[in-house]
Image: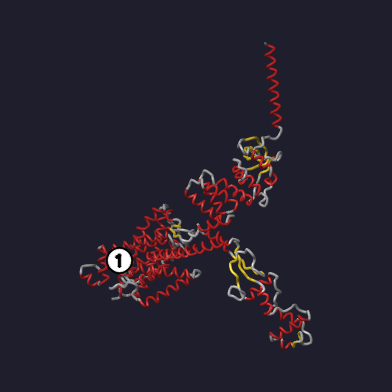
Amino acid sequence: MTQLLHACRALFCVALLTLAQICAAQDSTPDTVQVSPLQDVLQADAALIAKASRKTIGPVIDRIADSGLPAAAGFLSDWQEKNIWQRKADGLFFRGEEVADRLYALRDLDSGLIVGESPKDDLNQLKPNSGVRGLIATALVRFQLSDPDPVTRAEALLAIERRPGAELLAPLRASIAAEPDATLKARKQRIERLLTIGYGQDPADRIAAIRAMPTDLGVDVRAALNPLVATTLTVAQKLPDGANLARILTPGSADLTRLQAYDMLVEANLAPRRATSAEIKTLLADHIEGGQVGGVALIRLSDPQARALAYQALAGQGLLPPLVTDADIDRALAAHVFFETYAEPNADVTAAAELALASIATRVGLNQSLDLGLDAISLASIYFLAAIGLAITFGLMGVINMAHGEFIMMGAYTGYVVQQVIPNHTVSILLAIPLAFAVTFAAGVAMERLVIRHLYHRPLETLLATFGISIALQQLAKNIFGTQARPLTAPDWLDGALVMNDVLAISYIRIAIFVLALIFLAFFLFLMKRTRLGLETRAVTQNPRMAAAMGINPGRVNMLTFGLGSGIAGIAGVAIGLYAKVTSELGADYIVQSFMTVVVGGVGNIWGALLGATMIGGLQKGIEWLNPSNTLAAQTYMIIFIIIFIQFRPRGIIALKGRAAGD
């Protein structure tokens, strides 16, 4: 029994010694792993993968992506991110993770398990350049299209839109049926149609895809259709068989002149080159002998026919190349046909593309007209906001206030100061509106009490005084805020634009200004029709003496009315400051348009101011559309038109009876 026990102990010691030797042997040799399925695929192209080039790596990437192995997508992603290492000893590929200084843990590509460690000197890192990474990204799209994460699928679709290709059409089609997200599915279907148009092999599929796009105004749709109707002008002795002809051109027509057609023959080596008049003179000058050229006296060479005779004589002697005559040109043109062919060989596809582009062009034109109308309404809203206060001070009171623009500027700067104190843009804007009204209302009351009240019925002195105040307020703003433009930032919910399609969009700030203009219109109508101040203002406007006899204080009404108009200008300044630059010259940019709005609409009438703003805004945008490169010219034409308009309607669109109308 004891001997048996000793024998077991001896065998156990031998086993331990053998195991230790095996471990030592393993530590002294490179890590060995069983070649995995993906590793087997990679080893077939190991040399190309190790020295990847955009010209040669494409088929290798396709073989990896088409292998159907679960680890293929992960390998491509890690390769793209430069996380793949190749061991020099055996050429195997691993995912590498640095665990210590210049020491990397190696993970198996299929299982992801760590199979060993190697110093950096024993490894080569795969560093694909930008071109190779682009090819890898295209291959990864195939896997990303069916990824469980919708964000990943959306990113894959964006990658396809940026780098479309024929190889992406099949995987995209295969992913549509199983797409659970309705929005992504519609997007996939749209992209699939675009890829079918450009890369599809079946003409019936391409035509069906084209016919599904006439209502889509996307730029990418037109980019896909335009190459199908692109044409190339060609010349040949006869029309080619099976060519997709666009049209046949006749030399001498407006689209192809006679000489242009002959020059095409020369470029195609189908006719001899014709010498120009200057070249003929040079050639003749080289053959002057005894005062003659080809038997023609030099004195006669000023005549084109004489030069032609001399040239033909020299050509007959073989001294010059034959002269190309008009008859030669006509014969050459008659022996050839000039035609345009479509780049797309299938005529049915071309016809469908032309119909789709015609439909799209009509819709684009309608949307551009609507976009122009929205721009005009937006500009009219800005002009109306700037002019509504002036409609009170000038329209109702008859005061020519050249400092009205500076009240707009004061309101904008008030909003800027509030934003410096309250960083929350939504709260600051909501607080800035009443505060701007209070500041400019007080400034307007002070101006009326100190200056305007002494100048009623003296328009020239009022104009000069308010113009001086305007300059003083501008200089004061420069002294306080400097000459640099100050930002008046809109709240986050006003960022961006309401996008209808690729042609039609309007910013949220312009929508907000339009809504604010409607609010002011309603407020002004309520004030003038439903309040005591409005009643007294209308009474003083119509007949100040009778209003005073009825117990109304005209001075108090004028003060409050002027202050109200100034306060509304301050609120308009906050709104305009969100759209324009806040500088000391902000008001000066709108004062001319404000006066034109009031005068054209009808002095003293709020509806007239609204119509005037609409007319001026639409007119300016229309002129700018006709001459987009010169906005200054557009403003000049607009002023000329308004001067002519005033000649026929001196009281504006809607005339007001009373003091403001000059009655």
Q: Nearer the viewer, residue 101 or 609?
A: 609
Assign the C terminus to one quadrant of the image.
bottom left
Percent across and percent down for residue 45 are 68, 44
Mark 1 sits on what residue? 561
Count of numbered marks: 1
Viewer-closest of 355 and 10: 355
Q: Residue furthest left?
A: 550
Q: Residues within 10 Å of mark 1 (few under 14, many from 20)?
A: many
Q: Quadrant of residue 224?
A: bottom right
Q: How is the image coloured?
A: secondary structure
Residue at the far top: name it.
1
Q: Position of residue 503 (x, y in %)?
A: 48, 61
Q: Considering the numbered disc 1 on the image, is that residue within a helix, a strand or a loop?
A: helix
Rendered residue at 51%/58% (across/down): 211
Q: Nearer the viewer, residue 213 or 655?
A: 213
Q: Which of the 4 image quarters holds residue 439?
A: bottom left
Residue found at x 56% / y 51% = 159
Q: What is the x, y in percent for residue 569?
A: 36, 64
Relative side of 39 to 477, left or right: right
Q: Residue at x 33, y 65 (%)?
A: 565
Identify the image quadrant of the N terminus: top right
Up the image or down, 494 lies above or below 569; here it is above
Residue type at tag 1: Thr
Measuring from the top left, give residue 262's x and y in whole percent. 66, 74
